Image: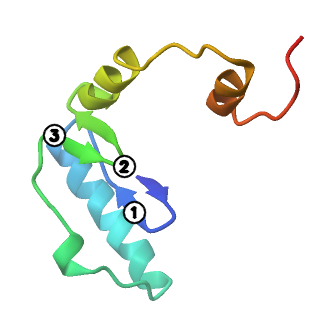
Amino acid sequence: MEVYVEDMLVKSPELADHIKNLVEAFSLLQKYNMKLNPSKCTFRVLSGRFLGYLVTQRGIEVHPNQIKAILNMKSPATTKEIQSLTGSVATLN
């Protein structure tokens, strides 16, 4: 199970493992009196988008739209544009 603040994902390579993992996840939620929003729950999904990534049977991959955005991005031409990519405010020499 992977948890990201308000989102969680239970994934398993085998169905038998998945059922066991779901039981464990639901037990933990119940133990700590945590509730799920049924309108945001999805079950029996072989692949899908999760937090901007593509989750498939092969694992977690970068979503193709993100790859396309990076490939189509204009190369930085100034120091300020380079700094904006890294979030840094340090001066480049």
Q: Position of residue 66 (x, y in %)?
A: 34, 29
Q: Circles 2 and 3: CB distance less than 8 Å?
A: no
Labels 3 and 1: the sequence-earlier one: 1
Disc 1 vs disc 2: which is toward the camera?
2
- Amino acid type for the residue under numbered disc 3: Ser
Q: Is residue 80 left or right of residue 90?
A: left
Q: How is the rendered protein coloured?
A: rainbow
Closest to the observer: 83 or 64?
83
Establish if 7 lies above or below 17.
Answer: below
Instruction: Give the image quarter of residue 37.
Output: bottom left
Circle 2 SS class: loop
Question: Tag 1: Cα neighbours inside 10 Å, few (<14), some, or many (≥20)?
Answer: few
Q: CA distance from mark 3 to mark 1?
A: 16 Å
Q: CA distance from mark 1 to mark 2?
A: 8 Å
**Residue beneath disc 1:** 7
Residue located at (37% from left, 65% from top): 25
Q: Circles 1 and 2: CB distance less than 8 Å?
A: yes
Q: CA distance from mark 2 to mark 3?
A: 13 Å
Question: Tag 2: Cα neighbours inside 10 Å, few (<14), some, or many (≥20)?
Answer: few
Residue located at (16% from left, 40% from top): 47
**Residue beneath disc 2:** 51
Labels 1 and 2: the sequence-earlier one: 1
**Residue beneath disc 3:** 47
Residue located at (22% from left, 71% from top): 40
